[in-house]
Amino acid sequence: MTQIRKLLTGAALTVFAAAFAHGALAQGADPGAQMPSQAPAAAGVAQPAPAPQNLTAPGPTDPLVQKRNADAQANTEYRQAKKEAKSQYKAQVKDAKINRKADRQAADYEMKSQMQGQSAQQPGGSTEH
């Protein structure tokens, strides 16, 4: 258990040191170059925000990568269109069910009213042949 702890601690320290060294190298070897840019901000003078950098790579030149990207975009568009069509279909089915239910209720009401009207016209219940 202690060996694993030492190993993990050592690995974490190594990663931290590598990240620190990478950050120091990325800022530049001349620490004096950073001082003038930091001094006006410390004095209360507002610095303009740095221009946003485009972090995405330019379009790939490999035709296979271009085809893969185009296929992925086409698949995404197809799925979106399919989902939209499915939702429209479900809405149509729902509306049709509501209309069918209303038609059935209207037909039942009409049939019941006709049945009551026939029984009122023939109080004796006799039928003529």
Image (tube, rainbow, N blue to C red):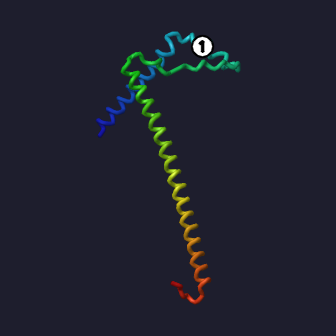
Rendered view: 59 above or below 89: above
Which quadrant of the view contains residue 15?
Answer: top left
**Residue 36 % position (x, y):** 62, 12
**Residue 92 % position (x, y):** 52, 51
Rendered view: 83 above or below 93: above
Rendered view: 128 above or below 46: below
Q: Residue at x 70, y 20 (%)?
A: 44
Q: Looking at the figure, which quarter contains the N terminus?
A: top left
User: Along the line of sight, which residue is nearer the eye, 52 or 107?
Assistant: 107
Rendered view: 75 above or below 88: above
Q: Relative to 49, is 56 on the left or the right?
A: left
Total numbered labels = 1
List the single residue furthest toward the front. Answer: 129
Residue at the disc numbered 1: 35
Q: Residue at x 46, y 40 (%)?
A: 82
List the single residue furthest toward the right. Answer: 44
User: Along the line of sight, which residue is nearer the eye, 24 or 105?
Assistant: 105
User: Along the line of sight, which residue is nearer the eye, 66 or 55?
Assistant: 66
**Residue 123 % position (x, y):** 60, 87
**Residue 78 % position (x, y):** 45, 35
Q: Secondary structure at mark 1?
A: helix
Amino acid carrying label 1: it is: Met
Which quadrant of the view contains residue 122?
Answer: bottom right
Disc 1 crowd, CA 10 A, few/some/many (<14, 14-19, 20+): few
Q: Residue at x 49, y 50 (%)?
A: 90
